[in-house]
Image (spheres, rainbow, N blue to C red):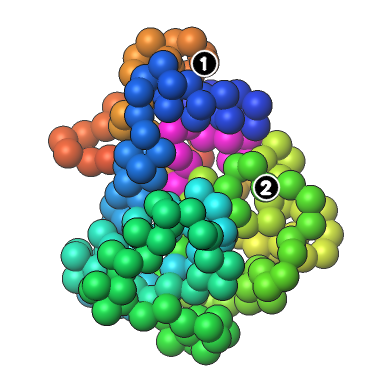
C-alpha cells in the first residue's frame, strides 16, 4: 500500500485538529508518539544488540517525544541516557524530566562522550516544523550524528532536514542519513530522500480525519503502535 505524504501546512493543521475536533491533549499525543518511537527502537535495536540508548532532545515537541520514548525504553530493559541542553520551562516537559529523574535515568552534558559509549541514538532534536539554520548548541551534535557509526533513529524528521526537500544540499546535515526514521501520524515529503528503515506511528488518527487530509492509515498488526513501510511504498 502506497502512503501519501503530508506537507508542513497540512501536518500542522492536522496536529491542531487532533487537539480540537478530536479532543486529544498534547500530553496524549506526545505519549503516543514516544511510545511509537520506543517500539521502533525495540524493533531495530533489540536488547541483545546493545542496551545503551542515547536520546538527543531538542527544546520543542520533538524533544518531548524523545523524553517519553526514553521512559518506555527504560521499562523495556534498556539503559537510556538523555542529552537535553535547552530545557523547556513548560510544565509538561518538566514533568517528563521528573519522571526520568525518578527512574535515575542520567542526563548528560558531554554529547561526544555519551555518543562514544552508546549502542544506539534517538534523534529527537528537530521535528517537521524545523526551518532555517541549526543554532547552538546543536551544530556540533548534528556534525557528530553525520560522522558516527552508531545507528541513529530519527523522530519524524532527521534533524537539520527540510520537510519538503530533505537534507541540505551542502554543509551541516548534508550527509546525515539515519538508519531508521519514525514518521509520526503520516509520512512527510522528506521520506522521498530517505534510504533507511521507515516506520509510521499513527495508530490514533480517526478514519474521518484521515479522509479529510487525504491519506490512508496503514494496517497495524496486533498491539503494535508502528508499521514498517517498504521503500517502494514511501516513494510518492
State the residue at coordinates (74%, 61%): 134
Tell me if residue 59 comes above or below residue 7 in the rendering.
below
Give whichever of 52, 70 is nearer the camera: 70
Where, quadrant-wise, is the N terminus in this rendering? top left
Magenta segment: does it hold 159?
A: no
Left or right: 134 in relation to 90: right
Which is more toward the observer, 90 or 160? Answer: 90
Q: Nearer the N terminus, badge 1 or badge 2?
A: 2
- State whether residue 233 is above or below residue 224: above
What is the CA distance from the residue labelled 1 to the residue labelled 2?
21 Å
Which is closer to the viewer, label 1 or label 2? Answer: 2
Q: Is residue 201 left or right of residue 58?
A: left
Left or right? Give the position of 151 relative to 136: left
Which residue is more in the foreground, 182 or 141? 141
Secondary element under disc 1, as helix, strand or loop, is: loop
In the image, residue 26 lies at what x, y percent?
41, 38
Q: Which mark is residue 213?
A: 1
Estimate how packed mark 2 is, as few (under 14), some (14 to 19) or many (20 or more) residues with alpha carbons within 10 Å: some
| Residue at position x 68%, y 73% in the image | 137
Image quadrant in which you'd find residue 216: top left
Which residue is drawn at the image coordinates 83% and 59% (left, top)?
A: 170
Q: Which residues are magenta?
A: 179-192
Q: Is residue 81 above or below residue 133?
A: below
Residue hosting label 2: 130
The spot of residue 44 in percent (x, y) is 34, 59
Q: Residue pushed farthest right?
A: 170
Task: Tell me the element at label 2.
Answer: loop
Up-down: is 1 above or below 132?
Answer: above
| Residue 227 disc label | none
Most extreme residue toward the left, as rendered?
222
Amino acid at each position: 500500500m502506497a502512503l501519501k505524504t503530508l506537507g508542513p501546512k497540512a501536518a500542522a493543521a492536522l496536529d491542531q485538529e487532533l487537539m480540537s475536533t478530536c479532543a486529544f491533549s498534547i500530553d496524549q499525543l506526545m505519549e503516543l508518539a514516544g511510545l511509537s518511537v520506543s517500539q521502533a527502537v525495540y524493533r531495530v535495536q533489540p536488547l541483545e544488540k546493545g542496551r545503551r540508548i542515547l536520546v538527543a532532545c531538542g527544546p520543542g515537541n520533538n524533544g518531548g517525544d524523545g523524553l517519553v520514548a526514553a521512559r518506555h525504553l527504560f521499562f523495556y530493559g534498556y539503559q537510556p541516557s538523555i542529552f537535553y541542553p535547552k530545557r523547556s520551562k513548560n510544565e509538561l516537559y518538566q514533568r517528563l524530566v521528573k519522571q526520568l529523574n525518578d527512574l535515575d535515568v542520567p542526563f548528560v552534558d558531554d554529547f561526544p562522550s555519551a555518543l562514544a559509549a552508546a549502542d544506539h541514538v534517538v534523534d529527537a532534536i528537530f521535528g517537521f516544523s524545523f526551518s532555517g539554520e541549526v543554532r547552538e548548541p546543536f551544530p556540533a551534535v548534528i556534525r557528530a550524528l553525520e560522522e558516527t557509526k552508531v545507528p541513529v533513529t530519527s523522530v519524524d524528521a532527521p534533524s537539520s532536514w527540510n520537510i519538503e526537500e530533505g537534507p541540505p544540499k551542502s554543509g551541516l546535515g548534508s550527509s546525515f542519513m539515519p538508519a531508521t526514521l519514525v514518521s509520526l501520524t503520516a509520512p512527510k515529503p522528506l521520506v522521498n530522500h530517505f534510504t533507511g528503515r521507515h516506520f509510521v506511528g499513527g495508530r490514533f488518527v480517526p478514519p474521518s480525519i484521515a479522509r479529510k487530509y487525504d491519506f490512508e492509515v496503514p494496517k497495524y498488526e496486533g498491539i503494535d503502535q508502528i508499521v514498517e513501510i517498504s521503500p517502494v511504498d514511501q516513494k510518492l
